[in-house]
Amino acid sequence: MKSLLVKSATILFPGSSLYGRVADVLVENGKITSIGTGIILPEGAGEADGSGKYLAPGFFDLHANFGEPGLETKEDLETGAAAAAAGGFTGVSLMPNTRPPVQSRSEVAYLVNRSRELLVDVFPLGAISQERAGKDLAELYDMHQSGAIAFSDGNKPVADSGLMSRAMLYVKAFNGLVFSYAEDPSLAGAGKMNEGTTSTYLGMKGIPSLAEEIMVARDIYLAEYNDTKVHFTTISTAHSVELIRKAKEQGLQVSCDVAAHHLALTEEALTGFDSNFKVKPPLRTHEDVAALRAGLMDGTIDAIVSQHTPHEIEYKNIEFEIASYGILGLQTVLPLAVCAGLSPELIAEKLSVNPRNIVGLPVPALAEGDAANFVLFDTDTHWELNEGTNRSKSSNSPFMGQQLTGKVHLVANNGQYFTF
Amino acid sequence: MAEKLSTKHLLGIKDLRESDIGLIFNAADRFKDVLNSPVIKKVPSLRDITIANIFFENSTRTRLSFELAQKRLSADVVNFAASSSSVSKGETLIDTVNNILAMKVDMVVMRHPYPGAGIFLSRHINAQIVNAGDGAHEHPTQALLDAYSIRERYGDVAGKKVAIIGDILHSRVALSNILCLHKLGAEVMVCGPPTLIPKYIHTLGVKTEYDLRKALNWCDVANMLRIQLERQDIKYFPTLREYTMLYGLNKKILDSLDKEITIMHPGPVNRGVEITSDVADSKQSVILDQVENGVAIRMAVLYLLASQRD
């Protein structure tokens, strides 16, 4: 790696004595070699102007899809990692929504080995149940041993309460973590969007908020009963926030995240039947968006995730009803967090620090001799997501062609760095 | 006729202004005279225009009504029955329709099982589209002919009270009717089993009633929807028998009301389920007038849309 000097950036590394102050950081051979002011640019080194920008530990995404193995026409590890890096992420954990699902040591090991050369660290999530079928537990310990960071059945909610309870309890033996993707399928029914004013106006069956909340409530009860951890991913309703807030006040081991698009978009975006707004959980109401933002501010919601879900155009440019769920997310998390009113400090907390704490990974530090793992971003540069700036293999983003505010300028990790 | 519709397509009542509805009704009045003429049953208005009726879902009634309207206007007509499919199973909607358009078709009348299919298609193809029903979203020509039939019966739609009774959740007739009747100044109530009434239906400005007799006592017009078990993915009521016990309209109930109300039904009637035969055939029923008006309304819509063309 070429040496790199970041000049005059505002430091947002938690625990650093320079937190909130402006400093220069010199990186040589992938390691931080000097931190201070007025560092002279070494000969041949690259330089990044950090003035008006923030230097934080690289962002970490708890919830993304890269399509490997089996769905490489949507995304592969290289294009996914490129999109992640462009979004400021130096680590991602990948959902097992693959073919086959990541459900045994071999898929976990495949992803770990395939991603060794990337700037972005890849952490597979292992399936909770075999074939994600919601019946029998997958080999959770074996996957844990080979590098699965936590467990999830991806976009399939665990409908069977007994199975969810056993999964939470079983992983306790090795301090594992189960993700809850909260949706009661029998209440969600044939719904394709949020149940509410808009679904009524569009003649569409709705997915009631209740379908999510009843599962959040169930899994809080299960965590309490089993005395275990649980992490809720992509919660989307005001009442879910309230349930988790109460569980935290009760002292239960509960954490949660929200997808960035749920902080910015509402069900009203669907009036044109544009499938680039078809996501699950569905886009909800203004009240839900306000509650999610408030939940981030008061600490109820720990982290923001991309829920990056690439799809080929063939799966999106069809009737809304049969279009696939999901949108690109990695490159728009930062601008959507800015749009939701988060300060740079809170962005670093929700995107860099808390996600790693949830899955028990060390948060990169800013110290001489440490490996460089950071992102340099701002909250005021305007840029456009378009075919030129999009790094994903797919282009199913509702923000395509739009001006966004808040830009990633530089990421560094694993002895590499990219500038944007 | 100098006046034109404000839309290029007829995708839903949503896109129509009150003036558009007036325009359609006035044209339908003239076409109804043509239909009832002993000599000229046909006008040359759409000569040299080719219309494809593309039905992704079975519908004998609506297709026949459209086809007759097209033939009375001297259009060339092709009918195409297709099945809707996902990516993995065959041709996409855009491809299907573009294949038909490549054979030089000017206008598409489409019935589709999914809400918004016509709106989606209008963004991707280069022909005029008439929505003949898209899932439980809209069925604009049905709503227009229903309102037209009320206007015919009472002289005006404004101020009338209309109860829509039955499966509101799966009905495209209900939504388009609510929107159309509101645009024309009528009051609307929906009535049916609570499991078949969308939770947020009140946001459309309608009253909700679960008791059939109360709904009938309130209204001037009762629009009895067809119970379509094939549209229900799961059971929303135990049996048809029990549905009829709660929401079936029979002569005894009809005769016990304080006033003489008008009975409508979009057809085909399940006799003995939502209404009994003696109600369907009574002088209070305008079911067959609706069918006749359907052709006139569809002639009016096709004629007005065709006159938008360059």
Image (tube, helix red, strand yellow):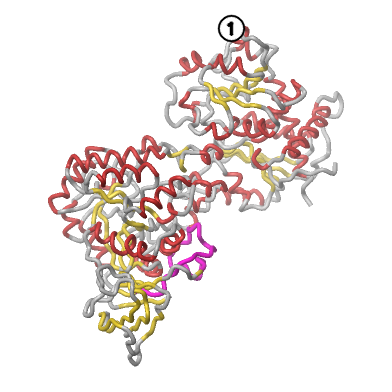
Residue A209 seen from this side: yes
Mark 1 residue type: Lys
Q: Residue at x 47, y 69 (%)?
A: A380
Name the spot of residue B226 as percent of width and height, x first: 57, 24
- Looking at this rendering, what residue extends furthest in the bottom direction? A43
- Looking at this rendering, what residue extends furthest in the left direction? A173
- Looking at this rendering, what residue extends furthest in the right direction? B39
The picture quadrant where one finds residue A308 is bottom left
Q: Is residue B239 left or right of residue B172?
A: left
| Image mark 1: chain | B
Q: Is residue A372 left or right of residue B276?
A: left
Identify which residue, B124 or A246, lies in the foreground: A246
Residue A46, compared with residue A168, is above or below; it is: below
Q: Residues within 10 Å of mark 1 (few under 14, many from 20)?
A: few
Asked if the magenta segment contains residue A407, the reply would be yes
Q: Is residue A149 left or right of residue A204?
A: left
Name the spot of residue B72 as percent of width and height, x first: 78, 33
Identify which residue, A388 or B220, lies in the foreground: B220
Residue B173, compared with residue A357, is above or below; it is: above
Image quadrant for the N terminus of chain B?
top right
Asked if the magenta segment contains residue B265, the reply would be no
**Total marks in image:** 1
Name the spot of residue A185 as percent of width and height, x first: 36, 38
Q: Which residues are magenta?
A: A383-411
User: Would you say the magenta stretch is mainly helix, strand or loop?
Assistant: loop
Residue B233, compared with residue B272, is above or below; it is: below
Identify which residue, B110 or B254, lies in the foreground: B254
Residue A341, compared with residue A318, is above or below; it is: below
Residue B56 seen from this side: no
Q: Secondary structure at mark 1?
A: helix
Q: What residue is disc 1 on? A: B252
Name the spot of residue A327 as percent of width and height, x first: 44, 56
